[in-house]
Image (cartoon, grey):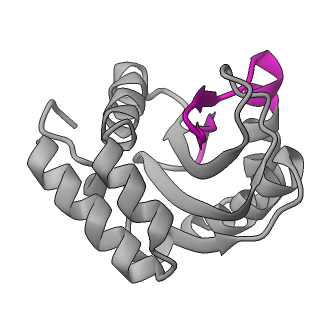
């Protein structure tokens, strides 16, 4: 993976969940772990544990209603992303205290090193684009959300 990695390298159309129904952070992460397990074949419990463990170090709610929970796991050979639009914003202990309605999960191979950080930065850059955010918050259809993210990824590349 190099500097030209885009969001669509991390995210497949079937990795967009809208709407995600969850009453809180823990439930949201467990739901997302379930989806990630279906996509990757990794054990749901390990995925859930990796995300919750990272969250215990400090919230991945970066502000503006966005959270980017992430974890590293053995057994995968590439970075994998999931995007979720939460039906009702949930408390995520975000840095700005705002509830979260956009969650992008990033699962990285155990030895991902710098690629993991580059991917996080790329995701944050796309999601901090106000017009992208406004669009994905209005759209309910997962395929249409994927199209917006793919288009913005292409422009940001």
Against 29, residue 120 (above or below) is: above
Against 107, residue 132 (above or below) is: below
Q: Nearer the viewer, residue 28 or 74?
A: 28
Task: Residue 122: tell me if it is visible.
Answer: yes
x and y, in percent, of residue 113 in the image: 42, 20
Quadrant housing residue 88: bottom right
Q: Is residue 64 magenta?
A: yes
5 relative to 95 in the view: left or right: left
Task: Residue 10: tell me if it is visible.
Answer: no
Residue shown at 70% from the left, 34% from the top: 98
x and y, in percent, of residue 41 in the image: 62, 67
52 relative to 136 in the view: left or right: right
Give the residues drawn in magenta, as a range. 53-75
Residue shown at 37% from the left, 36% from the top: 128
Q: Nearer the viewer, residue 152 or 50?
A: 152
Quarter placement of the C terminus: top left
x and y, in percent, of residue 79 in the image: 42, 45
x and y, in percent, of residue 3 in the image: 15, 30
Q: Nearer the viewer, residue 135 or 55?
A: 135
Residue shown at 66% from the left, 59% from the top: 42
Q: Is residue 20 magenta?
A: no
78 relative to 50 in the view: left or right: left
Residue shown at 55% from the left, 31% from the top: 110
Quadrant housing residue 34: bottom right
Quarter placement of the N terminus: top left
Against 44, residue 103 (above or below) is: above
């Amino acid at each position: 993976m190099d500097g030209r990695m885009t969001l669509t390298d991390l995210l497949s159309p079937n990795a967009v969940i809208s709407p995600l129904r969850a009453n809180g952070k823990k439930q949201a992460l467990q739901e997302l772990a379930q989806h990630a397990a279906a996509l990757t074949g990794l054990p749901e419990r390990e995925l859930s544990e990796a995300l919750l463990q990272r969250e215990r170090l400090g919230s991945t709610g970066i502000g503006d209603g966005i959270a980017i929970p992430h974890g590293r796991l053995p057994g995968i050979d590439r970075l994998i992303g999931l995007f979720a639009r939460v039906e009702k914003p949930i408390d995520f202990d975000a840095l700005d205290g705002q509830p979260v309605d956009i969650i992008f999960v990033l699962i990285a191979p155990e030895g991902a090193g710098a690629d993991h950080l580059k991917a996080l930065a790329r995701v944050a850059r796309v999601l901090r684009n106000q017009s992208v955010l406004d669009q994905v918050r209005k759209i309910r259809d997962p395929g249409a959300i994927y199209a917006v993210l793919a288009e913005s990824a292409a422009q940001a590349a």
